[in-house]
Amino acid sequence: MKILHVIPNLLKGGAQRLVIDICNEISKKESLECKILVLSKSNNEFKYCSSTLDITYCSVSFKLSIFNQNQININSYENFIDEFKPDIVHSHLYFSELVCHENSRPNIKYFSHLHSNRSVFKKKTVFNFFSKKSIYEVFEKNRLLTKYKKANIKFISISSDTYRFFTIEMPQNTNDLLSLPNAINFSRFKLLNKTLSSKQIKLITVGSLVPKKNQIFLVEVVNYIKNKNYDVRLNIIGEGPERKNIQNRILELNLNSIIKLSGNQDLIEEQFKKADFYVHSAVYEPFGLVILEAMASRLAVVSLNGSGNSDIIDNGINGFILNENNFKKFGDIIINLFSKPSEYKKLVNKGNENALNYDIKIYVNKLYKFYKN
């Protein structure tokens, strides 16, 4: 069986990481041939874990217009399909959807991976229907739905929130919807033991520095903990347009000696070993792979509820998840766990057990059954 995974780029992101982990595991099966097609000339930021994979880069352009002629050039993609002749095309992220379904082939089975609640699929109301953005999204959605009808396709949702969104916004495709929660390479992150520091609260967070990730909230959390006379440190991993705003708030509160902006990091598991708590502040989170990675690394997880991550965290059992954006309550949970090592250890062990259920080996076996069926 020949399988092609298509993705717009191999830059930092949960979808990209999942594709790499899937293909690494699939490649171990002798009956399967797996390739990755990247629809850009972008750099591969996953070289450290993708060196054995068959990855091809191609340049395509895809720009739709309601009133003017569409500007579509996907010849390099089409040529690759003709040469490789895949049995399955598995697309990731929205741009790949547009390219892969522009000219679907009857002899190919298609899988569309729903990594988030795509705004283009959301039904429009009378209050926002006539905005320029809404008109374009309705046009684009209807065009893509027409393309879907011509393809032998199944959709994969990554969380119960995404599954619910899809059934509401695209009920006509519900019968083709599969549920498969995301997964991690558990062996890469697992730690057999973790000793909680008795002197310093060591926090870490990972994510792009964009508004929805809300890292500036964690600056307030750290300031609150510090004002409670605890020695606290926070390592913020990631890059993005919000860096300046976060840095300014750190300086305003005079926290530059205890909060570190570390930028992007490749071997995130090494950073996890230096921390005791993983803190997650996203106001919207389709799933939360990094939360599972933190659990596998035996960190105590404290998170805001971003919808999709509520599938992973059983509040008070394997982590804590807050429904309100309250930095004082968030900080008090961390302080309480830090002050009670036995409760910390119990929570961490439950989190580790939970992460094992999301191992990539289990995931790929389920995915393989989908492919066969």
Image (tube, rainbow, N blue to C red):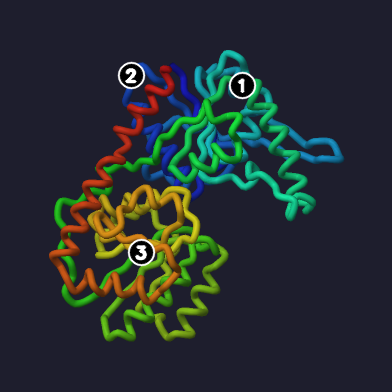
Residue 208, position as x, y percentages in the image: 49, 59
- The circle drawn on residue 39 is none
The amino acid beneath tag 1 is Ala
The amino acid beneath tag 3 is Val
- The circle drawn on residue 30 is 2
- The reply to whether the C-beta atoms of the residues labelled 2 and 3 are less than 8 Å apart is no
Regarding mark 2 in the picture, which secondary structure is present there?
loop
At a point 73% along the width and 41% down the height, the residue shown is: 138
Residue 79, position as x, y percentages in the image: 63, 22
Q: Which residue is mark 3?
A: 279
Q: Which of the pair 339/270 is nearer the observer?
A: 339
Quarter of the image holding residue 233?
bottom left
Name which of mark 2 and mark 3 comes first in the sequence: 2
The amino acid beneath tag 2 is Glu
Labels 2, 3: front one: 3
Q: Residues within 10 Å of mark 3 (few under 14, many from 20)?
A: many
The quadrant of the rendering that contains the C terminus is top left
- The circle drawn on residue 151 is 1
Q: Residues within 10 Å of mark 1 (few under 14, many from 20)?
A: some
For residue 208, above or below residue 235: above
Residue 128, position as x, y percentages in the image: 73, 54
